[in-house]
Image: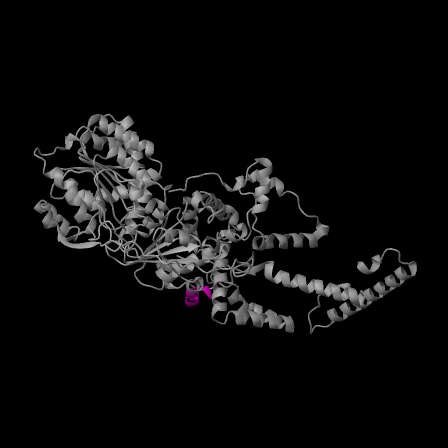
Amino acid sequence: MVATRGSPGAGSEARAAAARALSGARRQAKAAKRKQQASSAAPPAKRRNDTSLLPAGKTAVRDAERALRRRAHKVFSPRKCSVSTGDDNREEKPCIKTSSLFKNNPEIPELPRPEVQQVRETVFTPDTFQELGLHPHLISTINTVFKMSSMTSVQKRSIPVLLEGRDALVRSQTGSGKTLAYCIPVVQSLQAMPSKIQRSDGPYALVIVPTRELALQSFDTVQKLLKPFTWIVPGVLMGGEKRKSEKARLRKGINILISTPGRLVDHIRSTKNIHFSRICWLVLDEADRILDLGFEKDITVILNAVNAECRKRQNVLLSATLTEGVTRLADISLHNPVSVCVLDESHDQRNPEGKAVQEVGPPQPGSRPDGFAIPESLDQHVTLVPSKLRLVCLAAFVLQKCKFEKDQKMIVFFSSCELVEFHYHLFLQTLASGSGAPASGPSPSACTRLKFLRLHGNMEQEERTAVFQDFARSRTGVLLCTDVAARGLDLPQVTWIVQYNAPSSPAEYIHRVGRTARIGCRGSSLLILAPSEAEYVNSLASHKINVCEVKMEDILSVLTRDDCFQGRGRGNQMSGGCRIQAQTRGRAAQRLFCCIVKSHAGGPQETRARATVLQTVFEDYVHSSERTVSWAKKALQSFIRAYATYPRELKHIFHVRSLHLGHVAKSFGLRDAPKNLSVSAGKKRRAGVKRPALGKETQSKRRRLAEILRSEYSSGLEAVVTGQDRHRGRRAGSLGRGKQKRSP
């Protein structure tokens, strides 16, 4: 007891007086206790601390400390929260109250608004396919199967050039019909050959595409065009399929061969039945992406194999974004090519009539326009969101478009496969159904209509194909994917493109947003940036890409329309059990409760309260098991690694040191900033063996409170960087800051 210890240097008389006072107080306390036990009207009172024996000054100090500790306990200590989905009698488990999402955030700067005149292309022309002199059956197929009667601009300008037998470098905006621009001339030339093509002849046309999904889509397009010409056999080779069945198809014969580079090189080296002696067409679709994915060596092997057996052929390179790498490839593979580029007359100074830019000879890098053509029917938006609110903001936007609006189909792009997997499982368990979300009432029927799909490079090929076909057929749904779905895919009725992680180049941005607003349809896109990344808008503007700002508050306001968040968090529990407790805690507690109720009354306060509830739902799911916590940490580490791979010209905008690790961790449902992300589990266990002594309970509580506060006020990067610098002698090694390819 404090009263029996005395202060150093005190006399024996003072100690004796204090001892007598203490013994008297104990006797009085025992007597009072006996009286309370004898009385049956009132329950026994709790034992009080002996603070009444302290001097007045010490008692006031002790009361102040106790009140401060009680206030901190209300905000940061573990509480009882329900995890049931409608059963009030279900057992409650302790959890930590979600810390404030709207405090300690960086200020959102004014978004720069540069005046940009975007490059536009005229999509449709009044000219019909009958004017090209095509086979009547081919024209009938285009009209009936593809529902097209008039040509697009790129088709009008490229098909006559290709029918003349010229090599071509075709550049046009996304969704303008480039696939048909080369497929129609290929089919027309092959069906018109003097000697009828036999299946056993082998490939006459070779089409190289960067991804498996684009290979399937191109194969489907060619197959539809070949309906009247059954003697011409198409085929597809791609990774993930059985080599034995592909070898059997090659042995029987394929006349139009569509393949990804890696699988074709595999067959060139291991399959004896493949030959290119009759090749008349070599098409590289999305040529710049093929080079971006690191297929330079594979393309060299393919070109050498084709050149060894067939010197004379027609070569075509197509893309919406031509780069210097493509011009180097054109120097190697194209012979006296024609460059076809469709531009609007207001932006084409070299050709005021708005015709195709056709140049004899390989184009020079300096002749490439500064900007990329963007569909005129595409509305582009950007929003600045602090790191702590990114996850809640994304979820609110998905709910706004896919739950409260009809016929919305959305694609969300992430920077890595781990990010796709984490957000897919998180949204599937919390937004798509009420099974994984802590709810106190039945989920509304609208919640069950949300449909989430995922697509990335680490999935099995059968699953990738099923997801691709399912999303293409669906009228609504949300596809979470990497850049594997950013090139060439024609997914019908996609209305929104969300870029959760900023692309590493303007060309990547163009192809992402190009999955919507195709062939004249309307579409919209949203780019989510952190406040420190606001300058990225100027980088887009330098390439004639114009975006308009959407306020974060407008996105989060949709949560006030969703009644399923009223009973999911602490706000609903406050209105029940906490109201009864507040009535018994005195006036101060009642005033505190009234403030909490007023904050949920409406307006911005209600929006913030419901955003906190939604964040609590995510955090409760992430911390529901060690496996989900591990997934969240892996996704966080993958995000940081991808963040370190931005090119040098964007490092001043996207730099790892500008990240607040504690705030970023909140966007993955983690309550604390992880320590030493690369440390093995054994080291973590050894580091956590030491436990506080029982006599130091107060210090243990303070230490636990400090750990909870760390994710709010400290970035957490310093400790990780320091430890890695000691052991490895390099900066931020644990965060994977070395060069690493972004997962496709």
Residue 592 vs residue 657, the one in the foreground: 657
Residue 467 vs residue 532, the one in the foreground: 532
447 on left or right of 644: left
Please, what is the dominant secondary structure of the magenta stretch? helix
Is residue 241 visible in this depiction of the protein? no
306 on left or right of 441: left
Q: Position of residue 134 (x, y in %)?
A: 10, 45
- Identify the residue at image location x=15%, y=33%: 199
Is residue 736 visible in this depiction of the protein? yes
Q: How is the image coloured?
A: one colour
Answer with the quarter of the image where residue 268 lies: top left
Q: Position of residue 544 (x, y in %)?
A: 34, 53
Residue 426 vs residue 266, the one in the foreground: 266
Does the magenta run of residues contain 561?
yes
Task: Look at the image and tell me in which quarter the N terminus lies.
Answer: bottom right
Task: Look at the image and tell me in which quarter the C terminus lies.
Answer: top left
602 on left or right of 304: right
Q: Position of residue 94 (x, y in %)?
A: 57, 57
Does 683 appear above or below 622? above
Answer with the quarter of the image where residue 24 lies: bottom right
- Identify the residue at image location x=30%, y=51%: 514
- Identify the residue at image location x=53%, y=50%: 661
Does 152 appear above or below 25? above
Task: Give the number of marks.
Answer: 0
Does the magenta run of residues contain 372?
no
Magenta-highlighted residues: 557-568
Q: Position of residue 470 (x, y in %)?
A: 29, 50
Residue 193 vs residue 53, the one in the foreground: 193
